[in-house]
Amino acid sequence: MRTMWLVDCGRLPYGAAWDLQRALLSARQEERVPDVVLTVEHTPVVTVGRAGRAANILVTRALLDARGIDVHHVERGGDVTYHGPGQLVGYPIVNLRALNEDVVRYVRLLEGTLIQAVAAWGIEAERRRGFPGVWVGGAKIAAIGIAVKRKVAMHGFALNVEPDLSHFDLINPCGLGLPVTSLARVLGRSVPLDEVRPVVARSLETAFGVKFEPVPLADLRAHLSAAAPRA
């Protein structure tokens, strides 16, 4: 069975995780690392994808700054979304050759992974045609947005476990004008992120047909530094 690295990054500002993704993207393109999945919890941030429109951020930048919410314009697909504490974010840095470079199939694989994961709590989630992500009762519980560069995917998914859902009121999530929800809201109880992380990891292993090798973040950074091409 193929091995994939799994790196639990803990809580990181978005910019730090984005830098790490880009370093891994180059390393994966050059075959210096195997496929890797980063899991992370972000400090509050609004990200704007390639299709993003400024009008979908519903408040001023000054108000976001006052509430400690960063803004980043990034290369993933999709529009505007929010990340923050209580949300499990996953960034698979994977070569899509194993999926015949089929990007749509890859997005469906991520959706299926999260549908399987939330089923562990008895939640029946679904896809919605034309609206990437995972939905429960007409509300989005997980967002998906990726970028592919030289056959390698980056960015990924964000599963709402127990975030502050009021922060989504600051934006028009994904430009859809549709509600969002979370595991905690659906279940009516608090859900620790540590309860969810291993369930999602097992679902990812099944979906990708791999066995995860846990790699500490410090070891990953040391490997990238040691393996980086010298100028």
Image: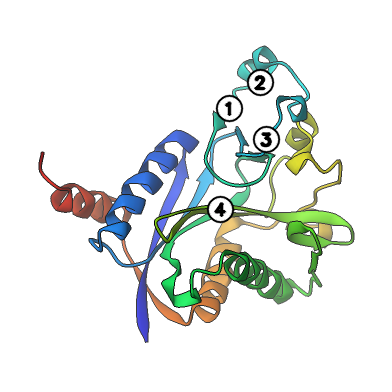
Q: Earlier in the sequence, mark 4 or mark 3?
A: 3
90 w.r.t. 69: above or below: below
Q: Nearer the viewer, residue 30 or 56?
A: 30
Q: Where's residue 55, x and y in %?
A: 77, 25
* 86 sits to left or right of 53: left
Of the 4 image quadrants, the one containing the N terminus is bottom left
Q: Is residue 38 visible?
A: no
Q: CA distance from mark 3 to mark 2?
A: 17 Å
Q: Earlier in the sequence, mark 3 or mark 2?
A: 3
At a point 63% along the width and 66% down the height, the residue shown is: 104
Dot 3: element: loop
The amino acid on which the numbered mark 3 sits, given as a three-letter code, is Gly
Disc 1 vs disc 4: which is toward the camera?
A: 4
213 w.r.t. 73: above or below: below
Q: Give the residue number, with chain letter if any, for mark 2.
A: 64
Q: Where's residue 54, x and y in %?
A: 71, 25
Disc 1 vs disc 3: which is toward the camera?
A: 3
Q: Earlier in the sequence, mark 2 or mark 1?
A: 2
Q: CA distance from mark 1 to mark 3?
A: 12 Å
Q: Give the residue number, with chain letter if any, for mark 4.
A: 146
Dot 1: element: strand
* Crowdedness near tag 1: few (<14), some (14–19) or many (≥20) residues, C-alpha within 10 Å: some
Image quadrant assignment for residue 38 = bottom left
Q: Is residue 123 visible?
A: yes
Q: Where's residue 163, x and y in %?
A: 69, 45
Q: Nearer the viewer, residue 216 or 131?
A: 131
At a point 61% along the width and 47% down the height, the residue shown is: 77
Q: Residue 71's mark?
A: 1
Q: CA distance from mark 4 to mark 3?
A: 14 Å
